[in-house]
Amino acid sequence: MKFSNPLLLQIPTATNGVNRLDFATYGRLLQHCTDHRLVRQGKQLHARLVLSSVVVENFLASKLINFYSKSSHLREALKVFDEIPHRNTFSWNAMLFGFSFNNLHVETLKLFSLWLSSPSAYAKPDNFTITSVLKSLSSLFPDLNLAKMFHCFVVQNGFDSDIFVMNPLVTYYSRCDDVSSARTLFDTILERDIVTWNSMIAGYSQEGYYEDCKRLYREMLGLEGLLPNGVTVLSVLQACAQSNDLVFGMEVHQFIIANDIEMDLSLCNSIVALYAKCGSLDYARELFEKMSEKDEITYGAIISGYMLHGFVDPALDLFREMKSVGLSTWNAVIAGMVQNNRHNGVLELFREMQLFNLKPNSVTLSSILPSLSHFSNLQGGKEIHAYAIRNSFDKNIYVATAIIDTYAKSGFLHWAQRVFDQSKDRSVIVWTAIISAHAVHGDANAALDLFDEMLNNGIEPDPVTFTAVLAGCAHSGVVDEAWKNFNDMLLKYAIQPSVEHYACMVGVLSRAGKLYEAVEFISKMPIEPSAKVWGALLNGASLCGDVELGKFVCDLLFDIEPENTGNYIIMANLFSRAGRWEEAEKVRDKMKSLGLKKIPGSSWIETSGGLQSFVAKDASNERTQEIYELLDRLLKLMKEEGYVSMDEVDEESICN
C-alpha cells in the first residue's frame, strides 16, 4: 500500500542537495497514523527514517514507541527505545506507557526499576511516570504496605499536589482493601475532577461498600459544574445490583436517560444485570431483547438473574440460544444449577462443556464439586482433585474449600484433613470448611480444637465459622461451649447473631434435652423466629418424645411453611410413638388433603459399575430380593446389638 497524496505532500524533500528532515512534520504524521490506526503507513514512515540514516532521538522515538505500542507491536517499540542514544523523560514515559497500555505490568515495573537505577540529569520521573507505575502496582501488588511506601515516594518527589497522580493513588488504596485511606486521600484533594470522584466511587463499589458508594454519588449530584458520567453510573449500578437496591438503581437509570449519557455495551449490561438480579426479570428481558448488540456478559447477566430467582428452564433456554458460549457463561449456568439443586443436570452440563474443548478453571471446579458431594461421588471428587493439582487450581481457596467439603461429605474425613494440612493460604474460608467437616461428623472436640487453633493463628472468625462451631456443639451436646461461643459473637467479635445462629443454639439445647430452656431462649430472641428455629425445636421435641410441645411447634410450622412434608411426618410419628393413633392419622390425612407426598428416602453407593441410586421401597433393581434379604439380616443384627429402629422418622438438623 502506498501513501495517499496528501500524506506524501507533507513529507519534506531534500533542499539544496542536503538531505534535511523536518522532524516536526514526521512527528505529526506518526501521530496521525497512531490516531487512525494506519499501521502500514506508520511503518513506512519509520522505514524512510532508517533509509535516511537518521539517528532517532527522543522526540521521534517517543512518537514511534507510542505508535508501535498502540498497534500491539511491542517488540518494535522496545527496539526503538533500546536504540535511543540519550533517553529523556519523554522516551522513558513512552515505553512505560506502552507496557502499561498493553497490560504488561511486570515489564512496566521492571523498566521503572531500571530507570531509577540509571540516574540522569535529563531523565527524571514525572507525573505521567507515576500514573503508569500506579496502574501496574494496582494490578499486580494490592499490598497496603507497598501502597504506603509508594505514597511516601510521591510526597518526597513533590507529586502530591498533582491530580493525575492522586487519582490512581486513591484507586491503589482501594485495591489494597484500605478504603478508609483512599477516602482520607480523597478528602485531602482540594480540586477534584471527574476522575477523582469516579476513583472513589468505584473503590467503594468494588470493595463492597455499597451504601458509601451510593451516598458519595448523591453528594456528587449536588456539585455545581460536575455531573456523573458513564464511568460513574457504571460503578453505582453495580453497587445497586449487589445490594439489591432496585429503587436507587431505577433513579440512576432515569438519570442516565435524562442526561443523554452514552449507552455503550458495558452500561447496557449493567442495567440489565441490575433488573435481573433484583428480580425484575420481565423488564430485564425486555431490555435484553431491545439491545442491538449483545456479548457474553449480556447473556450471563440475564441467565444469572433467572438462576438466582429459581427460573432454571428459561435460563437454560436462553443459554441454548447462544451461538458462541465462553467459559464464563458455562460457569454461570453450572453454578446456577447447583444453587437450584439440579445436580443431575450439572454433571450432564459439565460433560457437554468438555465436548466443546473448554478447559475447566477454578470457578468451574468450585461449582462442580458440590454436585459430587450431593451424590457422595468419591471417585469423581478424586478426579477433580487430581485435575486441580495438575493445573495448580488446588491453591485456590474456593477450590480447596470445595475439595475439603467433598471428601468430608463422602465420609473420607482424613482426606479432607490432609487437603487442609497441605493448604498454605489458610483463609477463614478454608478454616471454616475443615471445622464444618469435623462438626458434621459429630466430632465437636476436633471442631473446637481447630477453632481455637484458627484464633491462635490470628484469623478472625466470620458468621459462617460460628455456624460451623455451633453445629459441632449441637451434634455432640456440648452446651457450655455453645453458650460461650454464641455470646462471644457479639461481645468479642462484633458479629450480630443471625437467625441461623439462633436456630443452631435451639438445636444445641434441644438435643441436650433442655427443651424449655430452648423455648425460653426463643421467646427472648430480638428477631422473629423463622421456620429453621421452630424446626430445630420440633426435632428436639421429637427426640425427647414431648408430644405437647411438638404439637405447639407444628401448629406454628404448618402456618409458616405448609408445604414442608417433613413437619407432618415428624408430628405423625411423634403421635404414633405416644400411642395417639387417631391424631397421627389426622396429621397424615391433612397432608394428603393438601396434595403433599413424602419424598422417598434415597441414597447412593459407588460401585465398579458407577454410581447406584437406591430409593426407599423401590423394587426396580434386578437384585431387589437379595438387597431386601440382606437389609433384613442387618436390621436383626442391629436389634441384637441394642439399636432401636425408628421407621419413617425424618430428623433434619438445621446445623447440617
Image (cartoon, helix red, strand yellow):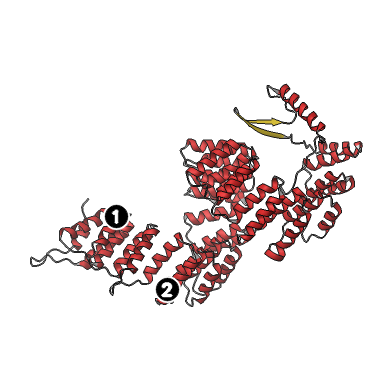
Tag on residue 75? 1
* Residue 406 in view of the camera: no
> Callout 1: 10 Å neighbours few (<14), some, many (20+)?
few
Please tell me which residue lies in front, 25 or 461: 461
Q: Position of residue 394 (x, y in %)?
A: 52, 47
Q: Is residue 288 left or right of residue 163?
A: right
Query: What's the residue at 53%, 71% (across, down)?
Result: 181
Q: Position of residue 127 (x, y in %)?
A: 38, 71
Q: Amino acid at mark 2?
A: Val
Q: Position of residue 613 (x, y in %)?
A: 66, 31
Q: Mark 1 or 2 closer to N-term?
A: 1
Residue occupying the far left of the picture? 17
* Residue 571 in view of the camera: yes
Dot 2 falls on a residue whose secondary structure is helix
Q: Position of residue 470 (x, y in %)?
A: 72, 53
Query: What's the residue at 78%, 30% (across, down)?
Result: 637
| Residue at mark 1 to residue at mark 2: CA–CA distance | 31 Å
Q: Amino acid at mark 1?
A: Arg
Dot 1 falls on a residue whose secondary structure is helix
Q: Is residue 504 left or right of residue 205?
A: right
> Callout 2: 10 Å neighbours few (<14), some, many (20+)?
many
Q: Is residue 485 left or right of residue 559?
A: left
Tag on residue 154? 2
Query: What's the residue at 58%, 42% (across, down)?
Result: 369
Q: Are marks 1 and 2 in contact (CB under 8 Å)?
A: no
Q: Is residue 480 above or below residue 370?
A: below
> Which quadrant of the structure image shows residue 648?
top right
> Which quadrant of the structure image shows residue 316?
top right
Q: Is residue 225 above or below residue 279?
A: below
Please tell me which residue lies in front, 95 or 441: 441
Give the total number of marks visible in the rendering: 2
